[in-house]
Image (cartoon, rainbow, N blue to C red):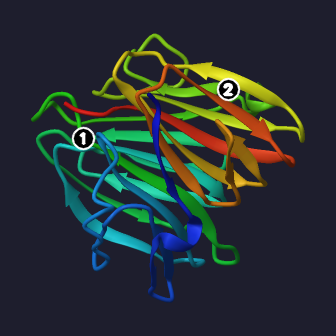
Amino acid sequence: MENFILHKASSRGHADHGWLNAYHSFSFANWYNPERIQFGMLRVLNDDTIAAGMGFGTHPHDNMEIITIPLEGDLAHKDSMGNASTIKTGDVQVMSAGTGIQHSEFNPNADKQTKLFQIWLFPKYRNVEPRYQQITLDTAKQKNNFAQILSPNPDDEGVWIHQDAWFYLGDFDKDLSKKLALKKEGNGFYIMNIEGEIEVNGEKLEKRDAIGIWETDEVEIKANSDSRFLIMEIPMEQ
């Protein structure tokens, strides 16, 4: 029997630091909600807007798979592995923090803000060698389709991480309806509606609403308007 939990956009944690306007789907920094610690192995989903020329100074991570998806603007990245690059809208970046890394993230533009999702998943294995990967997506594949952007397999479409997770981006025209089957038995889906209005297995999601679904084999997405969304298939337990 399918189970689900609905997370309305307005129920998220919110912190406005001036330079950073952040919405937290799960407990993060100064926002703590005992009912919103994680969904399966998904620990963090932050919806961040970074002011022009501002950003996060150098800070550490370990034993976490960190995925960054820019939604608007650019993000300049530097890390202790020697990587220095800029990710842009249409890119996806992943870091396996493993035994430990340090990195900084800045909006390099003086005249426009940067919007992004930063997502943390608990890894399948602890203390792996840190790694970095960044690719530019073919956004045309997202049109009226579930375009895979992440998987556990380096040979698959998209980036890869140390976890049995699959991510998809979709950009649906109004009235389109499609089903997506689970890749691995026992996993669940966490779906964030980025823009527009969709129905997920009959539950309505408006802009930045999210739904977690488990004990199901598939999800059906119906677009009530032109819509964009992120689907994450995630292990429910380690």
Image quadrant assignment for residue 30:
bottom left
Give the percent coordinates (x, y) of residue 160. Answer: 40, 25
Question: Is residue 144 something that shows in the picture?
Answer: no
Three-letter residue code for mark 1: Phe
**Which residue ends up furthest to the right in the rendered image?**
174
- Residue 13 located left or right of residue 33: right
Query: Vertically, is 61 above or below 9?
Result: above
In this picture, is 165 found above or below 191? above
**Mark 2 and mark 1: Cα distance apart in space:** 24 Å
144 sits to left or right of 209:
right
How far from the left and from the top, in percent, is residue 223? 80, 41
Q: Residue at x 16, y 48 (%)?
A: 62
Q: Point out residue 206 in the picture as x, y percentages from the top left corner.
A: 70, 59
Q: Quadrant of the C terminus?
A: top left
Label 2 belongs to which residue?
146
Task: From the viewer's perspective, tell me whether residue 109 is left or right of residue 225.
Answer: left
* Along the viewing direction, whichever of 181 and 91 lies nearer the viewer: 181
Foreground pick, 40 / 84: 40
In terms of depth relative to the viewer, which is nearer, 111 or 227?
A: 227
Q: Which mark is residue 122?
A: 1
Q: Quadrant of residue 157?
A: top right
Q: Position of residue 93 (x, y in %)?
A: 47, 41
Q: Is residue 82 left or right of residue 192?
A: left
SS class, disc 1: loop
User: Label 2 crowding class (10 Å Cα cut-off): few <14, some 14-19, many 20+?
Assistant: many
